[in-house]
Image: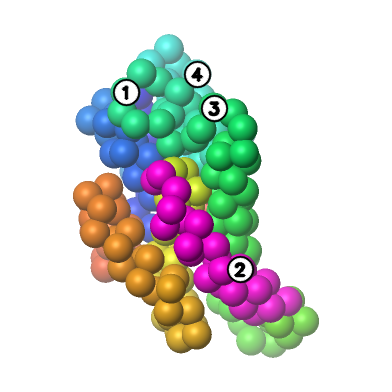
Amino acid sequence: MKLHWGPVSPFVRKVMITAHETGLAGRIELVRSLVAMNRVNPSVMRDNPLSKIPTLLTDDGTALFDSDVICESLDSLPSGPKLIPPAGDARWQVLRWNALGSGMLDALVLWRNERLRPEPHRSAETLAAYAQKCAATLDCVERQIPELDRSAFSLGHIAIGCMFGYFDLRFADIEWRTGHPASARWFESFSTRPSARLTESAFADTLVPPDAPLDQH
């Protein structure tokens, strides 16, 4: 398998944590692929007309995207522990957590892009809306921590962990740990998992400029 990959995309990190947790990381060849919202990458576009990362090429040449589809595909292969329950309330809870974490990542990428615009072109209304979504999501996750603690590690845990990691990488000015002690403790524990440690060094690659537009999925 081949993965169109970038070092700071939180969606790529979600896929790579899934790959490590399922024991499949060693079967994936990483292809460094730079993408941005305002330009296309022809090599990525040959496999994904949206020109986004992550894009996974399976062994039979099928191109899978976006991160949720790739993660579910990896989880379906006969490998390690399953990250998505097959049915019942547990499945919907995991998918809900995944939607919450990944949805916040979508919003953070767009929020960051707005913040990077020249100041005269920034929309104060848009910035305020994203700030409200951020605060509401952090409060929602804080209330979910006891249930996350009680549940088996899942794709939902991965998405929320990647969300907190992206806050630290791109939104250092937002002190999300303040007022969210349970989340801070949970993320500290999440960060000790081998899959999180193995993806953290690439994710926080200091050679990538902080304003580089490489965070799509």
| Label disc, if present, on residue 79 of the rendered structure | 1
Q: CA distance from mark 2 to mark 3?
A: 25 Å
Work out whether 125 lies above or below 185: below
Q: Circle 4: is it few (<14), some (14-19), or many (20+) Cα within 10 Å? A: few
Q: Secondary structure at mark 1?
A: loop
Magenta-highlighted residues: 129-153
| Label disc, if present, on residue 62 of the rendered structure | 4
Q: Residue 131: x and y, percent?
A: 65, 79
| Label disc, if present, on residue 86 of the rendered structure | 3
Q: Amino acid at mark 1?
A: Ser
Q: Residue 217: x and y, percent?
A: 53, 48
Identify the residue at image location x=65%, y=74%.
136
Q: Tell me the quarter of the picture where residue 103 sits.
A: bottom right
Q: Amino acid at mark 2?
A: Cys
Q: Circle 2: is it few (<14), some (14-19), or many (20+) Cα within 10 Å? A: few
Q: Secondary structure at mark 3?
A: loop
Determine whether, in the image, residue 179 is placed left or right of residue 137.
left
Residue 71 shown in magenta: no
Quadrant in which the N terminus is drawn? top left
Work out whether 199 lies above or below 210: above
Of the image marks 2 and 1, the number of the one nearer the N terminus: 1
Of the image marks 2 and 4, the number of the one nearer the N terminus: 4
Instruction: Give the camera-side residue of 167 and 47.
Output: 167
Q: CA distance from mark 1 to mark 3?
A: 15 Å
Of the image marks 3 and 4, the number of the one nearer the N terminus: 4
Identify the residue at image location x=56%, y=39%.
90
Q: Nearer the viewer, mark 2 or mark 4?
A: 2
Q: Nearer the viewer, mark 1 or mark 3?
A: 3
| Label disc, if present, on residue 170 of the rendered structure | none
